[in-house]
Amino acid sequence: MKRLLDILFAWRELEALRPLGVRGWALVMAVFVLATLSLGAEQFATPKLVGADGYFHTRMATVMAEEGLGQGFRWTQASVWKDRFADKEFLFHVLLMPFVALDDVIAPKVLTVLLMALLASLLAAMAWRHAWPWPWLWPSMLAGAGVLFHLRVSMTRPHLLSILLVVMAAQALLRKHRPLLLGLAILFPLVYTAAHMLLALCLVYGVARLVMRQGFPWREFALVLGGTAIGLLLHPHRDHLIYLWHLVNIQVVTNAFDRLGALAVEFLPPDGRLLLVDVGPLFLGVFGVGLAFSLLGKKSQSGDRFFLSCQCSLPLSLSEHSTFRRVLGALFHPVHGGGSQGFVAGFRCESLAEETSGMGGAGHHGFHRGAFGLHFADKPGDPGHSLKR
Amino acid sequence: MAWAPGLNLPFFHRAMEMGEVLDFLALSRRWLTWLKPDDVEPPLRPLTWRIWLALGAVFLFSLMATASIQFSQFGLVGADGHYHVRLAKVVSEQGPLDAFEWTQTSINRDRFMDKEFLFHVLLIPFLGDDLRTGPKILTALLAALLMTLLAWIAWRQGMPLFWLAALLLLAAGTNFNFRMALTRPHLLSVLLAVGTAYLLLRRHGWGLLLLATLFPLCYTAFHLLPLLAVIYGVARLLHGKRFAWRELALVLVGTGLGFLLHPNRANMAYHWYLQNVEVIANAWRLAPLMGVEFLAPSGRMLVWDCGLLLFGTLGAMLLTMLSGVKSSLRSTFFLLLSMGFLVMFLSITRLVEYWVPFTALFLLSTAGDWRDAGHGLGRWLKDYGRLASVVLIGLGMMLVLMSLRGLVLTQQEVAEEKVNERILSYEAGGRFLARHVPARDQVFTCGWDTFVFLFYHAPQAHYLVHLDPTFMLAYDVDLFDLWIRIGEGRQADAIDRVRNDFKARWIFIEHQEGYAKFLEQARRSTQLLPVFEGPQSSVFLYSDAHGVALIAGAIGL
């Protein structure tokens, strides 16, 4: 136990970072205010909740506030949830409670904006503390991250919280801030169903350290593993959580490949033109950074850990654009620049308004495609396509 | 012409004579002497007999692989090959064409340009009697030649593991390998582009001039080689060297020469515009009408089909960042090419054929940079011991497995074409037309991609449009709209309009969902007689006096 506490509170291993100071705080606050205003403008382009899932989460929070924790989910009678329910996003619903107590729509929308503004501020703080050049640039790149990214971060869903936790965990790993890492690892399974996410992040960090000849971070890995286990045990529906984890992370993803038509559009892979038009500067920026380093012959210092993280998440985000996109998006921005995407940003508010207005009868399945003019991959060979290839 | 004393303008307006060619070449050589390179080439690795032997082995291995893909079925692979083979046959019989009578409602009827003239000339000796086996052999040879050319460049440029080139191409996925099995002129253009990249690195003036002259004769995108020269110049600038003005000038002159030597030079600029601007714009605008090759690749294709190269590139850049190795001019040039073609590939799937070879060259070149900087395999093994061995063995196994996967899956895909009902039915319809349609009789088709099969089997008939609907759009917009309306069954008097506006006596209807209404119209019409019914296509004949005579006489019903 003493050894564990020694490891946990080994503050002396913290990497020295530049203190925030007055200028740093000014930057962070400025980013927060600007992000709140711009994301607020997007969010309130429609009076309704953005996307479909938000309706479930806000109602769930209301039900929890009124009835407390239930052991089943009576609203779906032909689902495993009826008897084997686990609130995959328990802490997000808890966080939503005070907001839904005020209002069903406006308050959750405000929370959504605040969470993303917090992410932008966190990126600004990281950029400042790590003394990255042009610290204002990296958080502001969120503004040019493409329509799809902005659409998703405008949805009142728990992924907002999970992005924040993942970015904070990445920072804690870089700093070897073990108490923070343990805390985040405990929180994560309570917030989000992909409980393995921080472990994967830790593994990627370990590989980056190995490549840099700094040894695998066993202590950090053990802490994250222990924290995740504690989080699972603390979860009010821990009995069914593992089963739900399997369903959501294995079955649903497998079905996304096998039965494309039956699942939500968010499981479709993006097509090449979406990568170019929507996230082109970020996608190609990765290559640009590689080119710049190889031309200069400079050895990478810390950014490569992020770089490696990005690369590891890239295959998954290409295969299924929503699940890992948030990690990708969050990790791309602080490190890799690509340029402005103002022309895309110009469509954002309009798209959000269109999306919401077109959502009435479309439901969860298929509402992305038509509304945004975004390209997802069609299956070659569909009727109507020519034989020429 | 001030810059070419002794040569006069009419020189360009008639067939070149050998004396004039020699004069021109002598003049060009004086240019080359005047425009000397501003630095010395890095020495090339010598070609010993052992290396020739190794390259021969790479070629044999590649040929076995490409032939095994090609002969997974006995027919020509894909659609376009049918057109190219038949056109080569026509060129062998009639010489270069000025007009293309087979498409009566296309810009090609009067303003034809054989975009791939030299490819068709190259095909002629391979045609054989069956118009099938020889072209398939040529296709396999050219694909194998590309793999060997990459290995050869890798060796000459001092890259390690040059023999890996063939495996890297096989591991590039089904999409790439399937396209390399198509009997199309891109085989020649990819070879020329890769060859030009090598000659740019060598700053080989004569070679560049020659390839740049050949390129417009082989392929319609003749801006490609000047672009390569510009990218090479940019790579040089990034390395603190002077822009490659000399090479760019040579490529431009060569391209101009090729342009002038082309038998259809009068229509070339117009066709370049159509093919490279209009067709691509339409690929975005009229997506459902265009070929599958114009669709963008899906994310899953990028990961699971050609992921090895995509993530290999990212991995190579990451390791370069970590080791602090400075990229060579060669690697920068190949990386810029790879990135440029990746952007194009992400827009249009067919451009995978350019992205893959340059990416493979970038990977091999980067490995050379690591080795030259003392970060080669030996260093990794020394620094990381067992871990490096495990990773290297894993990567090697992955490359072999991905190559095998690419080979086997492409074979399967090619073999499946043999049982593609749509193709079989079009071919059956084509053979029917070959037996019964009189020479120069007009056949109406709803789709544009049916042409290649009908032209291949029944070249005596006339059709509407080929290769791309844009050629009809450029010919007559109203007629194009009418054609679309008729095909989709939105034209009430369709049967009359086909006869009057398209002058057709025969109607070939593809059994596709989009044409179902028109098929019903044709079946209900009293003016039409159904004369052929396949699982995926039907042929109707107008039952007027001419039709009756035809039926009585030619068909014997």
Image (cartoon, rainbow, N blue to C red):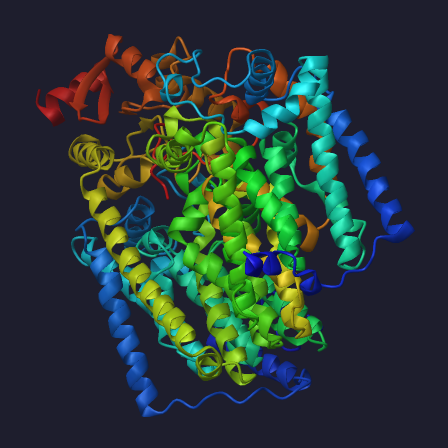
- Tell me the quarter of the image containing the C terminus of chain A: top left
As drawn, which residue projects farthest toward the left?
A: B556
> For this rendering, which residue is in front, B526 or B227?
B227
| Residue B468 locus on image (x, y percent) | 43, 38
Residue located 77% across and 49% down the image: A125
Residue located 17% across and 34% down the image: B428
As drawn, which residue projects farthest toward the front?
A: A2
Residue located 82% across and 44% down the image: A28
| Residue B269 locus on image (x, y percent) | 57, 50
**Left or right position of B145 against A372:** left
* Quarter location, residue B526: top left
- Tell me the quarter of the image containing the N terminus of chain A: bottom right
* Quarter location, residue B555: top left
As drawn, B286 above or below B148: above
How many labels were placed on the picture? 0
> For this rendering, which residue is in front, B499 or A346?
A346
> For this rendering, which residue is in front, B317 or B242?
B317
As drawn, which residue projects farthest toward the right?
A: A22
As drawn, A126 above or below B238: above
* Residue B475 shows up from this direction: yes
As drawn, A288 above or below B236: above
| Residue A358 locus on image (x, y percent) | 58, 15
> For this rendering, which residue is in front, B471 or B410?
B410
